Each structure stands twice: as C-alpha cells, then as structure tokens.
Image (cartoon, helix red, strand yellow):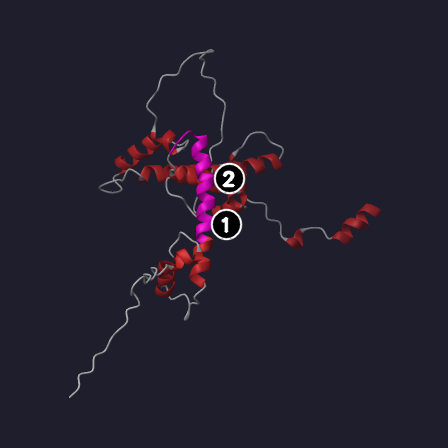
Amino acid sequence: MQRVSYCIMTGRGKGGKVKGKSKSRSSRAGLQFPVGRIHRLLRRGNYAERIGAGAPVYLAAVIEYLTAEVLELAGNAARDNKKTRIIPRHLQLAIRNDEELSKFLRGVTIAQGGCLSVTSCVMTGRGKGGKVKGKSKSRSSRAGLQFPVGRIHRLLRRGNYAERIGAGAPVCLAAVIEYLTAEVLELAGNAARDNKKTRIIPRHLQLAIRNDEELSKFLRGVTIAQGGVLPNIQASLLPKKTELKASKKD
C-alpha cells in the first residue's frame, strides 16, 4: 500500500507575515467605551426581542460623549476651586450650572453632591496683608452645604433610629433638607413678591406649598400655623361677564 502524506500550509512560510490581532468593536468604531459589554448588557436586559449590531455602537458613542462633556465641566469646576481631584460636588456644579445637562438630568440625584450654594459677602475684619490661619473645616463646608452636618449626625445618634449610622447619612440628609428648604423659600419668595411684600410670612409658605403639586403631595399631612386657606371661589358664585357689562353701562 502506498502512504499518502498530507501537507498543511500554515501561511507562515519564509518571509510570511503574521496575521494582525482581531480588533475589538470599540477600537474599530474609534471609541473608548466597551461596545461589547454594552451589547451584552442590552441583551441581558431584555429591552427588545432583537438588538441590531449598530445599537450598542451608537449607545456607547452617546454615553462617551456625555461623559466627556460632564468631565470637562467638572474639571473646570475643580480648577475653579483649586482642586486637582474631581469629587461629586464638582459633578453637581458642572451639571446644574449647564442648562442642557441640568434639564436632561433633572431627575438624577448625585450622592454627596450638595446643593447649589448662594454666595454671600461676609466681612472678616482682617486688614490689608492680614493672613488667615488655616482652620479645620467642618463637614458642612467640606460637603459644600449650609446646613449643619455635625448637628444632624448628633441628632440621628440620639434618636436611636438604627444601631449604626454611616458617615454619609447625615451629609445626604443635610443636602436633602437644604434642597427642600431652598425650594420652599424660593416659591414663598415669589408669593411674597406677588403680594408686594418684602417679608415672608406663614401665609406665603402655605401658598407656596399648596400651589406646587409635588410639595403639596409631599406635605399633605402638614398643617402650617397661621397659614390660612387657599382661595377657592366656585365658578357659579362669580359674577357673569354680561352682568358686569350691564352694571358698567348703568
């Protein structure tokens, strides 16, 4: 019997070139974000029966663009505050001070981001050339808040609401209380301005809260002392336009 030998060509003979490595979909699309991982998450999420090949590429491109925009603005905020590291506070400032990003992410809460502070001028009493000694910063100032984080932490511990209280709990609670207070005061200030008053009274707080859908629902069980009631005149009790015109003619 004759022996038949088979020769398998590998393609790497003398002077043969090595095949290039397979490129990822991210590198082929010129992106940094992982297209393959996003495609896998889309398939796992069961958002649709079928997912096109271009869907994860477009989604990765959009996420990468938004991330670059936010990081650029957050870097500017960190530079303005003379910091070399971006913290959640800088992300909060970057997003809320940009009209489009603030509108797009209006329902997003950034943990430890704080609230937008209202700057006020305080005279320190130190003359020209006076140096300020470095003082230990409070947790409120480090978080960029006006409400006292330390006092809220102390009250949480005294209240025995839980066995242990995390370090971030009073910061988040102070940020939420400060945000709600700012919202109520802004609406109450508008109510006072509409009534041509320069001082906010409980009546303005009542009007501000009850005329806002979300605040009214959130504080529906709260009674505001000396707040009065909302004016509610039924349409049948109002004078008709024809009667008003007739009275004017007379």
Measured as percent of width and height from the top left, residue 22 is found at 35, 61
Q: Which residues are magenta?
A: 63-84
Measured as percent of width and height from the top left, residue 69 is found at 47, 45
Which is nearer the eye, 36 or 216?
36
| Amino acid type indicated by mark 2 | Asn
Q: Tell me: residue 81, above or below residue 102.
A: above
Magenta highlight on residue 69: yes
Q: Tell me: residue 245, above or below residue 148.
A: below
Q: Quadrant of residue 169?
A: top left
What residue is shown at x 34% (from left), y 27% (from top)?
A: 138
Magenta highlight on residue 172: no
What quarter of the picture does the N terminus occupy? Answer: bottom left
Q: Which residue is mark 2?
A: 97
Residue 124 shows in this picture: yes
Measured as percent of width and height from the top left, residue 178 is found at 43, 36
Q: Which residue is mark 1?
A: 104
Which is nearer the eye, 53 or 224?
53
Which is nearer the eye, 215 or 174?
174
Check contact, mark 2 vs mark 1: CB within 8 A. no
As drawn, the residue found furthest toward the right would be: 249
Residue 115 shows in this picture: no
